[in-house]
Image: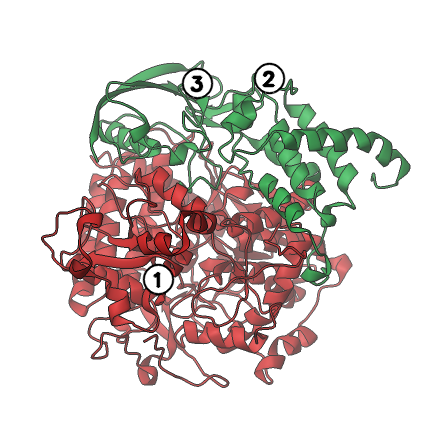
Amino acid sequence: MSINLDSKVPEGPMADKWNNYKAHEKLVNPSNKRKFKIIVVGTGLAGASAAASLAELGYNVDAFTFHDSPRRAHSIAAQGGINAAKNYKGDGDSIYRLFYDTVKGGDFRSREANVHRLAEVSVDIIDQMVAQGVPFAREYGGMLDNRSFGGAQVSRTFYARGQTGQQLLIGAYQQLARQIGLGNVNLYNRMELVDVVNIDGRCAGIVTRDLLTGEVASHSAHAVVLATGGYGNAFFLSTNAMACNATAVWRAHRKGAAFANPCYTQIHPTCIPQADDFQSKLTLMSESLRNDGRVWVPTSAEETRTAADIPENERDYYLERIYPSFGNLAPRDVSSRAAKRAVDSGQGVGPLKNGVYLDFAEAIVRLGEDTIRERYGNLFDMYERITGENPYQVPMRIYPASHYTMGGLWVDYELMTTVPGLYCAGEANYSDHGANRLGASALMQGLADGYFVLPYTISNFLSELLNKPIPDTTHQAFKAAEEMAGARFKQFASIGGTRSPDYFHRQLGKIIWDYCGMERTQQGLEKALSEIPALYDEFKKDLRVTGDLKSTNQTLEKAGRVEDFFELGMLMCRDALTREESCGGHFRAEHQEADGEAKRDDENFAHVAAWEWSGDPMAPIRHQEQLEYEVIKFQTRSYK
Amino acid sequence: MSNLTNITLKIWRQSGRADGGRFESYVIDEISDEASFLELLDILNESLIEAGKEAIVFDHDCREGICGTCSLMIDGQAHGPERGTATCQLHMRKFASGDTIVVEPWRASAFPIIKDLMVDRAPLDRIVESGGFITAETGGAPDANLIPIPKPVADASMDAAECIGCGACVAACPNGAANLFTGAKIAHLNLLPQGQAERYKRAELMVETMDEHFGSCTNHGECEAACPKSISIDVIAVMNADYLKSKFKNRKSLSRT
């Protein structure tokens, strides 16, 4: 399948493009919608909102989740909030300003027309979610409350305590549950996508593996939507849930969907540091803590005293020192790199010297413990539950961790991948955040894609297929894919080596974190590109999967996911190596200003790198989509 | 930071529904007190795999106490000994060297065992599908600030909406009742102005779907004690009041379809 990177951005001025699109797209008559079947894989914010909305329109929808219930998807863990250009505070917000902040925050590496549409529909999302019964925070007069987040000068973030993602997902889940109850959506739970099938140049359906019985089966449809989340677990340790994986997008990539900007990953600066070698995941502490906490490390690498015993003149409040105007609220990428430098120089704190202090002592003196408890009580409790330390008495220890991935399957303005009929939504696609995502924008994008973009754009494709039956799952292409998938899992079980899938995942994650994490160099990336294939060979020879193929086998599930992370890891490093600039979350040590800030190269790299699968994970083919900025002109991001 | 030694785990193993199941004992020689309880199981599983034995199946995902996937009866308590804490947030420092810890799947006939410690909680989804939503199809919503909601009302609704759907309330209940789960969903939606149109229809349908699958509430209060989100049994009173009223209201109005 040849790669066509036509973005299909509509004509007209930026502010009119989406309206123009909606005015001229092809529609499907309401009574014809029931003739179409659409598969939606994933039931997070993007998947649940898409499946529910498409079913409400009258399409037949098959929804797939590998969880026991659609409500478990990892969107549920988002804490902070969701942005919308409502301007309820009258503080100068507008669609243009949200558009501008998102393009600038993304370091000029996103597609302007997509971002503008995102800002436009952001206001509809809040209306929709309130109508669904999401209990957003309110002021005493009964109006919605807002707060402010990084990268913005207005208050446009809506929130539901520290559980905004949970409340939004439950809203979308309930809407989906209604459609399941009405029989408009068939839900397949505990079912994992293991392949994507194309027939006659378009996506014909998917192959799944039942996680309870091991049965491999095919499902066909007129269109397929992948809303399967990001690939942050490539690093092994991340704030993602344990089961988050890249299998669906990677299998689609191997069947012709271009993978865009895999090196754009976001490292969040305030997570609880790793406590031991067997740690399974990292936990985020909300960015909001940096409003009152002061970040510091001891000046001496030999320091052994407890935090309270270290005098002021032997502490380095490095963010306040280096970035006096933003101080402890410097952006995520900048703060993360500064923490890494402190720990790398031996000044780290904690038993493993792998964190920095986030100290509330001064804020407690200034505001009183009660005020701090009111603002951050639930976070302090969570910290104490995990570490056993009381942050009212001793400083928190924090360190950056993988949190979100901006890269993903390349999609055009209609959210279609390079495979006709195969769509990608939410974190799984690469679209709207460029090289760096701003806080409270992920929930916005997932719901925008599912509620307000896909239901419009998908009819433009389906109208051509009217009265054409769905592909036959006895077609040779489906049978071949089923056989391949079955054989692949049988192979994992038959290697009979000595190491578990987790062992390899941990080793792989360490390579990717060390060389393709917060700071990347040519030498390091080349090293990673020799170490990953070597480890992959060992995986193929020394993997051990116990248990059987015909009942629940979490070891076997994990083996498949880890194998896909191996191939994706190679692509992440290859992409980071070929992007010879620093931008957003991608920092190449060779490309920095004298003061250590990222040095972007707009002349040579203002493009999307879209990779084509060649059959060899070490030899992917690079394509480019040039990014044009009609409205917002290039400028350097500065936070000094 | 210190290490615990000589921990004995008695874990329920059951290969499927046809198997009767049994406890098996495993000894963990040494474990950091920083480890979470599920990391203890990870370590055990890794050693089982490397010894050529089948790993223990258990449900888990976010490990932040929010997704509701994890379960486990630990020493007979749903989610273990720490109040207001899901199993994934329980850490080994709550245990001592030499302890024997008994680990079982959720106990409830509505949650049949799939394998080892994994159960099928699908009836909870059936309750939500029967009425646990506000009908507001995509696209037609009015401006969000057109519906002012007093802060105490929004807060009370949010208290109920925090439910993570883990099923601990059912597992802890001597009757296997799902009243705390169902009551939390009904209270979340029925307290809000947006939820009024379907209020009584919702209460009637959800309670009756619940009764098809689960046991009856006899006010033990074990559910509140086990809930990792500390949801108050007051929500059951809200549910009962609305269910009773539904038997009058739904007859008068034509809201039943």
Placement of the N terminus of chain B among the 4 image quadrants = top left
Q: Is residue A209 above or below residue A571?
A: above
Local crowd at mark 3 within 10 Å, few (<14), some, or many (≥20)?
Answer: some
Kindly identify the residue that appears in the image at 70 percent across and 33 percent down: B238
Provide the secondary structure element on which disc 1 rests.
Answer: strand
Residue on which disc 3 sits: B76
Q: Which chain is red?
A: A
Local crowd at mark 1 within 10 Å, few (<14), some, or many (≥20)?
Answer: many
Amino acid marked by disc 3: Gly
Kindly identify the residue that appears in the image at 56 percent across and 16 percent down: B174
**Residue A582: % across, % down:** 28, 74
Left/right placement of residue B150 relative to residue A534 reads: right
Q: Which chain is green?
A: B
Q: Examine the image and state in which quarter residue A138 appears.
A: bottom right
Residue B175: mark in rendering: 2
Q: Examine the image and state in which quarter residue A606 appears.
A: bottom left
